[in-house]
Amino acid sequence: MKFSTFHLFHRFDGQSFEDVYAYHLELIELAEELGFDGVRLAEHHFRDYGVAPNLFTMLAHAAARTSRLRLGTGIVVLPLHNPIHVAEEAAQVDVLSGGRLDLGIGRGYQSYEFEGFGVDLAEARDRFNEALEVILGLWTRESFQHEGKFYRTGTEVSLVPRPLQAPHPPLHVAAVSPETVTMYAERGLPILADPVATFRKVVKAAETWRDTAARAGHGTDAELVVARSVYVAPTAEQARDDQARFEAAFDRSRIFNERSAPIDPRTGKAAQGFEYYQDRYLKGGSLSPDFRWEQLDVIGDPARVVEQITLLRDAGFANLLCDFGSTRPMPLEEMKKVMRFFAAEVMPAFA
């Protein structure tokens, strides 16, 4: 099992943008020092939920401050970008980092962001699939021309620079709905599994991915990534107490609300292609501590956390993307202690 850290770049009350960037860049440097395999950064727009709108800019900066760490996106929202720019910027970061880029991609889901860019959320799936075709074409062909519904090159073009990794940087597709898992398993593209699905659902997703990929004639040894909220304390009792303290200090409705939900503004219901999400993000603020403890978070004392991660590893996941508190207003030194404790007490069990 590999371990990576997740960085939302959430801006809490009283923080400047500079504060947010400095906080996470210091944690990224610490992740390399502690032996984590990589980091992944989240893209968001128009609100404090995440203030890193261009992940490649941030990763290029992180590349200069690290030497070994894998540098990943988690995720680039493809429908909000020209895929030619994504292919170029990703290739440039791959070269600058010495071949350390991991590209996580997805169709997105937040209606507020799509409205801000003037993009119809109901088109997200089709835009994503076409954008992926363009990126792979530019990465793998010496010259490439595309005339599609949403994107066109106009003439044959050649990508400059080309990625350092061959044939291209590793790709992971964000998978929330079961249909997404199946769709991209049929293409042999590994998934980045849903951070707010239960253990049972992500284990099922890994099983579905392997079975579907095998039937489609693909190898099943691809690195599947699963994202989880992670917290380990010296005792289970302290972990539960800390969990209660974290929840009390943060209003989850700031994350799970109408702006986060994939709602079609014309109907007030889930946008076309997002039926799986219906009401999901509107209900997210009411998750009970018991539900999070038993079914959702990797949390507890070291022995319990090792047991939970072993479950995920045995299900077929090879990389745990650890969210140590992206929505918790945790002082930097306290967050560093959390990461150091996890690295010392949990990671050696999977060395």
Image: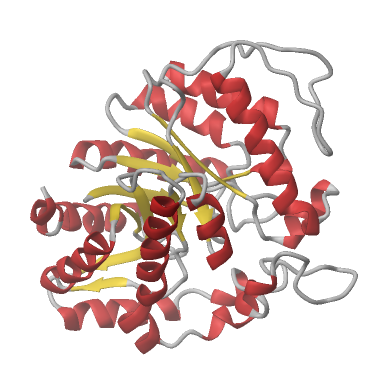
Quick check: 93 above or below 221?
A: above
Q: Is residue 33 visible?
A: yes
Q: Is residue 322 above or below residue 302?
A: above
Viewer-nearest residue: 41 or 329? 41
Q: Residue at x 81, y 34 (%)?
A: 148
Q: Position of residue 211 (x, y in %)?
A: 39, 59
User: Where residue 208 appears, x then y in whole percent?
Assistant: 42, 64
- For the image, the number of numbered tags is 0
Could you say which is closer to the camera, residue 281 or residue 103? 103
**Colour mapping used in the image:** secondary structure
Between 330 and 217, the one lying in front of the other is: 217
The percent position of residue 340, horizontal first and vertical second, equals 19, 52
Residue lying at 59% horizontally and 68% vertically, measured from the top left: 255
Q: Is residue 9 visible?
A: no
Residue 53 lies left or right of residue 157; in this view the side is left
| Residue 140 on image: x %, y % | 54, 20
Q: Is residue 6 left or right of residue 236?
A: right
Tell me if 79 is positioned left or right of 178 in this view. right
Query: Which image quadrant is residue 33 in?
Result: top left
- Residue drawn where x is 55% and y is 31% of the image: 56
Image vertical order of residue 296 relative to residue 60, above or below: below
